[in-house]
Image (cartoon, rainbow, N blue to C red):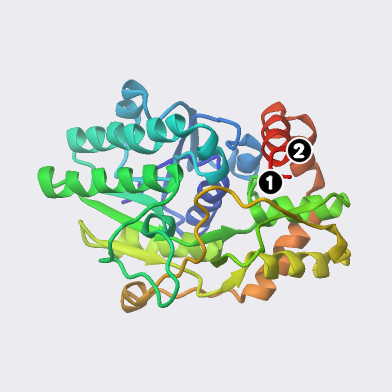
């Protein structure tokens, strides 16, 4: 598999994956398809633009024509393209269904038509729902609790059905919460880093006791790479960081790293259907030879430093992107 189509490659994880693959495999070429919605950002791809092994096309994964024109000429497809923000899914669930389910259908149909060697669908630990104790394994029941996680579950179930019914070589990864450079600043870690840098409030949902398993984005990329090359068709693999922290712990760590006071924390009304705890068992991935390499505390420190060193990147979004301003102002003004 030396020519890979990366859908959603101008987003946070997708752009990091492109960078990772081009660096690791000197004989691979990467083709990116991205609709450049509010979270897609050509600035994320600037350092790869002049690489002769990199190509970019703007387009929607729901567009059969552009999808077929690209899929016919690649060996594998890695699908990052998705609407991903839980808060936005509560406001506009329909948009999530169209991209996260129907878009996956369009990609699968093209892969079926052209005999693609591998279709890797990037999913999320949120499809499992919340768990009070223990960790979710790949065979556990899916109980998604938000329109976002439900749409992701729908997309991956459709992908699995294409393996069973049509023998399309599908593999699926379920990743835990990512963090790192180039993450759109509506997500918790970059939102709180940039707010703290501007001495703005950090809105913490409820009591801040929600637990997430955090993975540094480069570790997630290496896990996806491993499953792409080693994963047998039909297989689902959890890719987690093994770093469980409450949202409040993350918030206080960010403030400490920036030397900012905890008085910036503002407790707000919890969002509807907010899962209390996510936790992944990654024994299968470990048996396949993968494990995360990055120390969480060091990776968080490096992430804070990246946002400090790249103010122009996030200020362009926060100060000049109307979609960002309108959504955050509307959403948090209703939280109290």
Give the structural element (helix, strand or loop) at label 2. helix
Q: Quadrant of residue 244?
A: bottom right
Q: Position of residue 73 (x, y in %)?
A: 30, 34
Q: Quadrant of residue 250?
A: bottom right
Q: Position of residue 332 (x, y in %)?
A: 71, 41
Residue drawn 31% across the image and 44% down it? 154
Q: Nearer the viewer, residue 293 or 215?
A: 215
Q: Is residue 170 left or right of residue 259?
A: left
Which residue is identified by label 1? 185
Q: Is residue 207 left or right of residue 234?
A: right
Mark 2 near mark 1, Cβ–Cβ under 8 Å?
Answer: yes
Quadrant (top left, top right, bottom left, bottom right) of the C terminus: top right
Q: Quadrant of residue 319?
A: top right
Which residue is identified by label 2? 318
Q: Position of residue 301 (x, y in %)?
A: 73, 68
Counting other residues with Cα less than 10 Å from the Cα at mark 1, is it few (<14), some (14-19), or many (20 or more)?
many
Q: Is residue 229 left or right of residue 202?
A: left
Give the structural element (helix, strand or loop) at label 1. loop
Q: Is residue 234 above or below residue 111?
A: below
Residue drawn 45% across the image and 72% down it? 132
Give the alpha-carbon distance from disc 2 to disc 1, as whole Å: 8 Å
Counting other residues with Cα less than 10 Å from the Cα at mark 2, is it few (<14), some (14-19), or many (20 or more)?
many
Q: Nearer the viewer, residue 303 or 25?
A: 303
Q: Is residue 231 left or right of residue 100?
A: left
Question: How many tags in the picture?
Answer: 2
Residue drawn 37% across the image and 27% down it? 62
Q: Nearer the viewer, residue 109 or 334?
A: 334
Tell me if residue 153 can be seen. Answer: yes
**Residue at the farthest top position:** 65
Q: Earlier in the sequence, mark 2 or mark 1?
A: 1
- Return the mark for residue 317: none
């Amino acid at each position: 598999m030396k020519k890979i189509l990366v859908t959603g490659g101008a987003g946070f994880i997708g752009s990091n994956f492109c960078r990772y693959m081009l660096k690791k495999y000197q004989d691979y070429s990467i083709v990116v398809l991205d609709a450049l919605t509010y979270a897609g950002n050509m600035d994320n791809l600037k350092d790869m633009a002049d690489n002769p092994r990199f190509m970019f096309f703007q387009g929607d994964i729901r567009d059969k024509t552009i999808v077929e024109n690209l899929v016919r000429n690649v060996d594998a497809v890695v699908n990052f393209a998705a609407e991903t923000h839980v808060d936005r899914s509560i406001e506009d669930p329909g948009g999530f269904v169209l991209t996260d389910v129907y878009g996956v259908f369009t990609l699968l149909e093209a892969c079926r038509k052209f005999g693609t060697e591998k279709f890797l669908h990037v999913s999320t630990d949120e499809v499992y729902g919340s768990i009070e104790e223990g960790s979710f394994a790949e065979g556990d029941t899916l109980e998604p609790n938000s329109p976002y996680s439900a749409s992701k579950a729908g997309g991956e179930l459709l992908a699995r059905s294409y393996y069973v019914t049509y023998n399309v070589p599908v593999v699926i990864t379920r990743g835990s919460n990512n963090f790192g450079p180039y993450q759109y600043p509506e997500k918790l870690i970059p939102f709180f880093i940039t707010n703290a840098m501007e001495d703005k409030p950090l809105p913490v949902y409820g009591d801040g006791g929600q637990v997430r398993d955090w993975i540094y984005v480069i570790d997630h990329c290496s896990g996806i790479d491993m499953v792409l090359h080693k994963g047998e068709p039909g297989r689902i693999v959890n890719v987690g960081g093994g770093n469980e922290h409450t949202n409040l712990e993350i918030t206080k760590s960010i403030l400490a790293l920036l030397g900012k006071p905890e008085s910036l924390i503002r407790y707000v009304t919890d969002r509807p259907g907010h899962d209390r705890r996510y936790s992944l068992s990654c024994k299968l991935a470990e048996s396949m030879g993968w494990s995360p390499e990055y120390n969480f505390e060091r990776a968080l420190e490096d992430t804070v430093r990246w946002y400090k060193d790249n103010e122009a990147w996030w200020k362009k979004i926060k100060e000049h992107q109307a979609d960002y301003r309108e959504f955050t102002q509307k959403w948090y003004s209703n939280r109290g």
